[in-house]
Image (cartoon, rainbow, N blue to C red):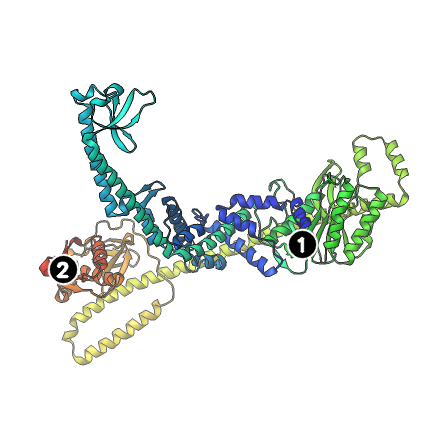
Amino acid sequence: MDNLVEKSKRVLEFDKILDRLNSIIVSDLGRAKASEELLSTDINEINRRLDETSEASSIIIKKGEPPLFGIYPMRDYMRRVKIGGSLSPGALIKISDFLRVSRYLKKYFNFEEGAENFPLLEQLATSLNTFKSVEDEINNAIISENEISDNASSKLASIRRQILKKKDAIRDKLNSIVTSDSERQYLQDSIVTIREGRYVVPVKQENKSKVKGLVHDVSSSGQTVYVEPMAVVNLNNELKTLQAEERDEIEKILLRLSELVADIGYQVEANEEILKELDFIFAKGKLSIELKGNRPILNDRCYINLKEARHPLLNVEKVVPIDIYLGDEFTSLIVTGPNTGGKTVTLKTLGLLTLMVQYGLHIPAQESSEMGIFEEVLADIGDEQSIEQSLSTFSSHMVNIVEILKRANEKSLVLFDELGAGTDPTEGAALARAIMDYMLQRKIRTVSTTHYNQLKIYALTVDGVANASMEFNVDTLSPTYKLLIGVPGKSNAFEISKRLGLSDEIIDYARDLISEDNIEFENVLQSIEEDRSKIEEHKLRAEQSQMELELKNEELKKEIEKVKAQRDKVLRDAKQEAKKMLNQVRGEIDLIIEEINEIKAELTTEQARRLQQAQDLFRDNIKKVSDDGYEIKLEKAKKPVKDLKIGDSVKSVSLNVEGVVLELPDNDDNVLVQMGMMKMKLPKNTLVYSDKSEEKSKSKVKRIIDTKSRFIKSEIDVRGKNFDEAKVIVDKYVDDAYLSGIKSVRIIHGKGTGVLRDKLQQDLRKNKNVKSVKDANYNEGGMGVSIVELK
């Protein structure tokens, strides 16, 4: 039985879709997952799979392709380390890559607050375990599959330094031998080489007894012997000992790293399952993007309504989309049309898209397409003869059909290509009708292609069966590949023959040979086709008119919006002008109030009370007028200020108010300005230099500085606070100290772990008012106190 299902998948080319998916999957683990995934018949499970694919394609479009690399099978490695085994450098590098991709993927899913949610994939990603410390330990210790870093341990670095020194000593000793006049005459070449891991010199065969040492090798010609002079035997022995120590230390390092991996073995195995799943899901998302696929709407009524569906293996630019529906008003569809007109492609498209959906893939069709869930998709397509059984085409098809009829039920989708073909036309047509009746009675969703007129009439006269045809253009003698449901196909044999040059006499004689009923039926089909063409033409005109109306409607909407925008601009400009005038008046009033405050001391108590009441009433009225809910639009100055100094007199061109600079521009180029009794941050490019005397401005600044200097201390204590809390306090304190003229202050932060000290010092060095930062002397607090020199 399973052979029938697998054969149906093969003829529908589902295996080619899986091959394409496998080519996108990055890892062998992901490909194993793809082969394990079975077609589902559970609508909830299929919905989940399709949602995963939707999330993957959306994330890829939003953030680019995910970092998928280093996804290796980990179970064998984990099994080895759990029993105390040691891993090779190559295995540890793979584990490091595996841990890094887990960390990168988790970071890949970090979205800004309020961004689109991807619950299924985010749940997988948040379940990933990250171990950067283990990852760093491995990367620090291992350079490649064959090389361990000196950083792996201090002992290894020490041994290697000794090895280098020992090798240098051996070379120096041997070089003195090969360059000695007394010894060089016995040598074949004045070089130093290595044999069996020991440093040797090449000696002529006849002189080997004249050079004291150990013979380690002989050349292939026998003319040269490689001798280790006695002078370096001890050095070579010491080198061998050091190399043995190096190997022992490397083994200890590998064992230590393997133990670190063993500690996280269960989490690594859990990551393996998650990464395998993510690799597979992202491949589905990439395939969806490649196919320009969409997620269809699912139903459990075995109802299909595909809109603009395309065969996923055909060129997307050339394939003609089809609309096909089945399972509601009718359960059987009979498709007619000429050969090479697209009937078989239609069957394959329907069957293949059904399989893709139940596997969890998006399909190349409109989003509004609907797809039912079927227990099985059974297909008899193609001209496959069974050579082994010596069966004809008809017999081969009939073997499949018999198996399909035994197996199909109302939850099956059955596809027949050229039902009843390959035998006597009369018997074939009768057999095809009987099979279609059998399917209809059992409400089995069936689509069949045929050439038989009897089946066209059958579909017209029987409830639950519908005709469909592949459109054919007689004028161009070519198919359009469009599927027309509800319209039976006309054979067009006479029309095609006539256009190809067959004489009218032969065509008329052929017509006489056809029964009157058949001729009438063909004429009915021609009439239906003509009516359909006219309806299609009227429909296109109506759609065109609708589009024109919509375009005009959009133009009118834009005009209305334009008028509204102009009206709003006029109102906004008027309000801004009023606001500008109001602020100018307010500035002048503030100056008057400031002068009044200066003479208050000379007034009697009753006069002062009345004056205060008048001030309060005036301020309340001004507030009511100004609190109208819109913002002032600050106008840029034509010649804005450039090099500002604290105490400079400036003027806001928008507010028409003069003031004094209290703070230099911040990172956003905003300047703190004292304007009367108000302090306001204004953009630098909205300010110009004032005509006021500098002395008056400086006197105001001096009053501010004097006020600060009376209260400022020479040190501040931020112990017990984190960096963010301490930064706010320290920044304000340093600014106040700078304004007060203090040249040096102490920041008490404590020693602790040193993190707060390092971060504060690093931040203070960026402050434009700070000249230098250093630790206090030992007897003044040492590393627990920072001394800040101000400019």
The reply to whether residue 58 is in sight is: no
Residue closest to the far left: 779
- Residue 105 in the image: above or below residue 421: below
Q: Disc 1 or 2, which lies upstream in sequence? A: 1
Numbered label attached to residue 376: 1
Q: Nearer the viewer, residue 102 or 491?
A: 102
Q: Nearer the viewer, residue 70 or 551?
A: 70
Label 2: element kind: strand
Label 1: element kind: strand
- Residue 716 in the image: above or below residue 16: below
Q: Residue at x 48, y 52 (%)?
A: 278
Q: Position of residue 728 (x, y in %)?
A: 24, 62
Q: Quadrant of residue 599?
A: bottom left
Give neighbour class at mark 2: few <14, some 14-19, many 20+ (Cα, 10 Å): many
Q: Position of residue 345 (x, y in %)?
A: 68, 43
Marks 1 & 2, CB-CB < 8 Å contact: no
Q: Position of residue 141 (x, y in %)?
A: 31, 46
Q: CA distance from mark 1 to mark 2?
A: 82 Å
- Residue 559 appears left or right of 712: right
Q: Position of residue 473 (x, y in %)?
A: 73, 39
Residue closest to the far front: 209
- Identity, as a three-letter code, of the amino acid under mark 2: Val
The reply to whether residue 241 is in sight is: yes
Numbered label attached to residue 745: 2
Q: Quadrant of residue 328?
A: bottom right
- Label count reads 2
- Identity, as a three-letter code, of the amino acid under mark 1: Glu
Q: Tell me the mark number nearer the camera, choosing from 1 and 2.
A: 1
Give neighbour class at mark 1: few <14, some 14-19, many 20+ (Cα, 10 Å): many
